[in-house]
Image (spheres, rainbow, N blue to C red):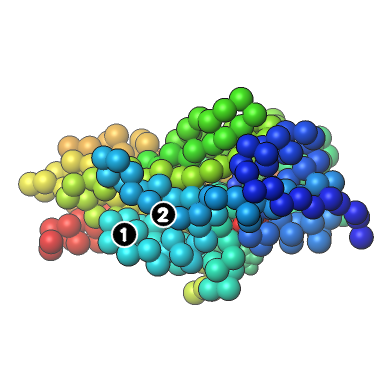
């Protein structure tokens, strides 16, 4: 058992100061990922700063529309919020597709966004891993990589980001509120994450000590419908092999608004920017959706055992968009 200090501040600024004090400190939210990694020896903090007493709960309306979701709102509470279920079904569906009921009761909004990869080598301290120990290598490239990335990866790391919530928030154009030693700032959720390049241990753009205080959902797009689809090995309690979040509005048979994000394919939620650009103003039909998603996935670089993800993602995305178009037309 490795000793660590444990503090429970009641003020967010105080929490930030505590964490900014040293690289071996970690924020503790629901603990469903961090504590597991501590047990495995992957995380070895000297100080845990428990966020549980900070006033970071609650879902509140924003001036001008939209919702502000406190960092400590649990995945279960957010999925069940009537405003989320009605105005942001993609978000509610993504949350309910993640983990299990017990985990969702404990897991928080911010903790979910910052959970670590499920790459088996990352979780096994007996193995090399560039993300866990920079410069030691990436055994996943030659070894077990069926679940790992086909987009945005590098020769140094092919891990995927496991969060379903982050994929839905990316399609919703959500922002993340941060508080750091130098004050508050806001990042688009997709900009929270880095691609691995030659520094896979640097996963996000948080500055030392920065605390996620909330997530901001913009007002729902008028006339748009949204949904989340996830393909996994089991019907529940399993991470995505591929998932897709979509927000679509159609007028007179043409796409007037589209956001698509994929999960399970990349080291971060993968906004399908090429497909979105190609489809804006295009016919909202299966042929257009398929052509645009094929263009999006043209940059995929699968390895020996994960090439199945490319057609899987294409078909999942096409199915999702066709269903959304039909749903929008039926309203
Ligand atoms: C068996 C199992 C199955 C799962 N399946 C899924 C799934 O299908 N889909 C899915 O999305 N997830 C899944 N999860 C992951 C689960 O959703 C995450 O463990 C959970 O969301 C993490 O939230 P937490 O509050 O417990 O975070 P913690 O474990 O407390 O923290 C996680 C990380 O976030 C940091 N952190 C927490 N809060 C803040 C903050 N406010 N500011 C800055 N940093 C912060 C911590 O320091 C830590 O590094 C699964 C987990 C398990 C164990
Ligand atoms: S894919 Fe990334 S996390 Fe997995 S072994 Fe390679 S470097 Fe480590």
Residue furthest to the left: 252
Q: Is residue 120 left or right of residue 24?
A: left
Q: Position of residue 152 (x, y in %)?
A: 55, 38
Callout 1: 10 Å neighbours few (<14), some, many (20+)? some
Q: Which of 306 and 103 is in front in this view?
A: 103
Q: At which x and y percent is residue 198?
A: 69, 30
Please indicate whether residue 245 sits to the left or right of residue 87 in the image: right
Q: Which mark is residue 291?
A: none
**Residue at (80%, 46%) from the top-left corner?**
47
Could you say where residue 217 lies in the image, as x and y percent from the top left? 37, 45
Give yes or no for contact between labels 1 and 2 (Cβ–Cβ under 8 Å): yes
Q: In this view, does 182 lie above or below 18?
A: above
Residue positioned 49% across, 74% down in the render: 235
Where 233 sits versus 92, above or below? below
Q: Is residue 230 visible?
A: no
Among numbered discs 1 and 2, the one appearing first in the sequence: 2
> Residue at coordinates 53% horizontally, 43% vertically from top-left?
213
Secondary structure of the residue carrying tag 1 is helix
Instruction: Kindly report which numbered mark, 1 or 2, lies closer to the viewer in this rendering.
Output: 2
Which image quarter holds the N terminus?
bottom right
Decide which of 192, 11 is in the foreground and name it. 11
Question: In which image quadrant can residue 315 be found?
Answer: bottom left
Q: Is residue 199 visible in this depiction of the protein?
A: yes
Query: In this image, 282 relative to 269: left or right?
Result: left
Q: In this view, does 268 lie above or below 311?
A: above
Q: Assess mark 1: CB under 8 A from ligand 1?
A: no
The image's mark for residue 83 is 1
The foreground one among 261 and 98 is 98
| Quadrant occupied by the C terminus | bottom left
**Foreground residue among 90 and 297:** 90
Q: Residue 59 carries which label?
A: 2
What residue do we see at 22% from left, 50% from top? 224
């Amino acid at each position: 058992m490795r000793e660590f200090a444990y503090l429970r501040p009641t003020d967010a600024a105080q929490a930030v100061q505590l964490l900014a004090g040293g690289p071996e400190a970690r924020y503790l939210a629901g603990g469903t990922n961090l504590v597991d990694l501590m047990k495995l020896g992957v995380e070895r903090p000297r100080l845990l700063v428990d966020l549980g007493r900070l006033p970071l709960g609650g879902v509140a309306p924003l001036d001008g529309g939209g919702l502000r979701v406190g960092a400590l709102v649990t995945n279960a509470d957010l999925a069940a919020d009537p405003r989320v279920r009605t105005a942001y079904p993609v978000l509610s569906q993504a949350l309910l597709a993640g983990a299990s009921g017990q985990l969702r009761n404990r897991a928080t909004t911010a903790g979910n966004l910052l959970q670590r990869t499920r790459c088996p080598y990352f979780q096994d301290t007996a193995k090399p891993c560039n993300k866990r120990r920079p410069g030691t290598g990436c055994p996943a490239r030659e070894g077990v990589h069926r679940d790992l990335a086909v987009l945005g990866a590098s020769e140094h790391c092919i891990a995927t980001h496991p969060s379903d919530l982050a994929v839905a928030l990316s399609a919703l154009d959500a922002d993340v509120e941060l508080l750091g030693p130098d004050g508050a700032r806001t990042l688009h959720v997709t900009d929270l994450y880095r691609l691995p390049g030659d520094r896979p241990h640097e996963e996000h753009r948080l500055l030392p000590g920065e605390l996620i205080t909330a997530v901001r959902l913009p007002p729902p797009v008028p006339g748009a419908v949204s949904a989340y689809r996830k393909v996994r090995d089991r019907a529940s309690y399993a991470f995505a092999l591929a998932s897709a979040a979509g927000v679509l509005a159609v007028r007179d048979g043409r796409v007037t608004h589209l956001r698509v994000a994929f999960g399970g394919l990349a080291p971060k939620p993968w906004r399908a920017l090429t497909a979105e650009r190609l489809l804006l103003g295009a016919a909202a039909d299966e042929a257009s959706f398929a052509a645009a998603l094929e263009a999006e996935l043209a940059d995929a670089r699968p390895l020996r055992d994960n090439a199945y993800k490319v057609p899987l993602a294409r078909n999942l995305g096409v199915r999702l968009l066709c269903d959304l178009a039909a749903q929008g037309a039926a309203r």
